Image (spheres, helix red, strand yellow):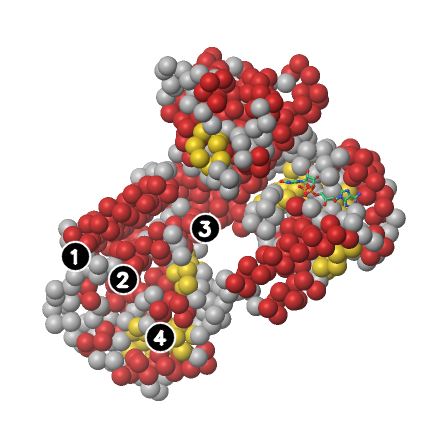
Amino acid sequence: MSEFHYELGADGVAVITWDVPEKSMNVMSNEGYHELGSLVDKGLADDAVKGIVITSGKDSFAAGMDLNVLAKLKDEAGDDPAPVIFNWLMEAHKLLRKIERAGMDPKTNKGGKPIAAALPGTALGIGYEIPLACHRIFAADNPKAKVGLPEILVGLFPGAGGTTRLSRKLGAMAAAPYLLEGKTLEPTKAKAAGLVDEVVPADELLAKAKDWVLSAGDADIIKPWDQKGYKMPGGAPYHPAGFMTFVGASAMVNGKTKGVYPAAKALLSSVYEGALVDFDTALKIEARWFTGVLMNPSSSAMIRSLFVNKGALEKGAVRPADVPDQRVQKVGILGAGMMGAGIAYVSANAGIEVVLIDSTQEAADKGKSYSEGILDKGISRKKVTPERKEQVLARITATTDYALLDGCDLIVEAVFEDPKVKAEVTAKAEAVIGADCIYATNTSTLPIGELAKASKRPEQFIGIHFFSPVDKMLLVEIIKGAQTGDRAVAKALDYVRQIRKTPIVVNDARFFYANRCIIPYINEGVRMVGEGIAPALIDHAAQMMGFPVGPLQLVDETSIDLGVKIAKATKAAMGDAYPDGAADEVLFWMAEQGRLGRKAKAGFYAYDEKGKRQGYWPGLADKYPLLDTQPELSEVQHRLMFVQALEAVRALEDGVLMDIREGDVGAILGWGFAPWSGGPLSWLDILGSARAVDLCDGLVARHGDRFTAPNLLREMAEKSESFYGRFGASKKAA
Ligand code: NAD
């Protein structure tokens, strides 16, 4: 099946149209590359062709490279994959260079055919790298379109010449937001930034591009870098201004990434080294660094978790197949507090009718006003129109009247974390709602099976666990009680899809999955304070592994009294098996001192009047004097990583996790587990099961049994297995 079409008009302009069959957006495949290459050859070889326009048959140009192709590239490249990957990249460079040089004489730069890109909408990744190789970029005036190079966000960098071309077109400094941060722009802003050349009305797009092609002369189609005397805008590295840029960029990248993302470093190196040589050598350098990135296990793990598997989960990979569409029309939300208010906003924003209930009208109204606040902020940032705000708010009915729940097809309960209160509102809601309605609880700690006892229809009872703040956090954890039926699971998944978040489905057990792993992370950090390890070493060790916040900062944010409450409840439930006495000693003492965290402006950190962190609280060192000899950074890091990763393995062993993809994607989106690693199970795969077991044995000897390698990991080490090797085909644990 053809992905590109070719049509030569009477005007002598050949139009190459990208239109991948049966896809709503174009993505580049290996076949696509070959087709585009041969059509460009055809146009350049035909004397009747005066010039070429490359456009799309869809309302967007292209979403980028098919990352599934990249994900498989290394595995399918044989025993020595690096040269295979490098040659593959050089083929792409050759094709784009052919477009750029367009048949012109290498010496005189004359006689080439003008080639324009005409972008009807979004053009990302290779979808912008192809236009960058063309001689002029026309974009339709489509404010919904996005133009740019977001590769860095999935652990890659633009590897089809985008890095080399954009840095030479704009200069390293001006290109930095697009290359290093993956920033994308709508066409008008893209023109102002120099990413596209012209923005034209959508219905004139092709005509304008053709007009240009027919009028362009030799001088209009030579790229600056192919002309004598080309100088990089803003200065190349040995120019004084360029020197400042590169030193600054390097510091910024290392500051932001802590050196754990190979793609960011490789990108900088490509720009820097490429700037010192001619254009074609620079492309080779880009290809070498890109090969290095693809050879790094971090990149394949990131693509696998953040693109392939995240996408699969969002599309319903774990949805019961035989249940018909369960999209939600009207949701009833019980409790308009912090969580209920956020759930109301994301639901109404997705077009769902919302009934938001609290025990007083004032509390319900306050919950609704949360949405108003978010929408007003959106208006001030020009992301939301006043009409949109009215539409969204009109969907939310704030009330105390349970009778208004009539007609709801989903209830999400978010009242106090108290089984009695929860049972009471379950009964009140079930007295009104229809027989088909699914009832979900947003509890973070109470077993779903226990709460379901208050329901008349436990097969329609399920956990839908949001993370705070609801409008920002991307993950939703769906929890199946022992009696939860398939329709409830399908309903929860269809709802999560409507509100555009990523779901994982887990079985019912203490703390489900995410909190089960976060709590040991916090406890390990707190325990280290008690041992006399410097607090800065603890938090920095975590951040240098790629965590957004260290455990001490995290517990200050979530509050120390919540930690105490959870610890007491867990201890009561577990009895002698409770492992965290050493952490509790510190936590309980902090609570006694009234240091309850950021909300009290006093915690592991000291805070100023406005609640801004002011460094660690000096009183900590009086109570827990620092060890004379502090541990190695790697020891602290291994403790913090293993304590979470082993919990993920135990969750898999226990059957709480049913799919390793969910364990990895859930960890990154749910609590920011080192994204560069692809998630805790991917991280263990990168280490290798045998090395992981060895490290665990060492940690057990030095720090205790909580680091005991689970049987599953030990067995895998004996058989030289990896998680994705063992569970990869079925993705299932069972
Ligand atoms: P919150 O105290 O901010 O809100 C609870 C709301 O429920 C209050 O507005 C209260 O007035 C209302 N309420 C209490 N009893 C009621 C009743 N009988 N009828 C109607 N409304 C009633 O608490 P929250 O942080 O929003 O947490 C709500 C639930 O979400 C809890 O189960 C909690 O464990 C869970 N949760 C919280 C977080 C978090 O980070 N805060 C994260 C995930 C899940």
Q: Report the residue that reaches farthest toward the bottom.
A: 10
Left or right of 658 on screen, residue 334:
right
Sooner in the amino-acid sequence: mark 3 or mark 4:
3
Whether residue 693 appears in this view of the structure is no
- Which element type, helix, strand or loop, lies under badge 4? strand
Q: Which mark is residue 198?
A: 4
Q: Is residue 122 above or below residue 682?
A: below
Q: Amino acid at mark 2?
A: Leu
Q: Which residue is mark 3?
A: 68
Q: Is residue 734 above or below residue 707?
A: below
Q: Amino acid at mark 4?
A: Glu
Sooner in the amino-acid sequence: mark 3 or mark 1:
3
Mark 2, Cα crowd under 10 Å, few <14 / some 14-19 / many 20+, is some
Q: Which mark is residue 278?
A: 1
Q: Is residue 307 above or below residue 201?
A: above
- Which element type, helix, strand or loop, lies under badge 1? loop
Q: Position of residue 337 (x, y in %)?
A: 69, 46
* Mark pair 3, 1: CA separation: 32 Å
Name the residue: 58% across, 24% down. Answer: 593
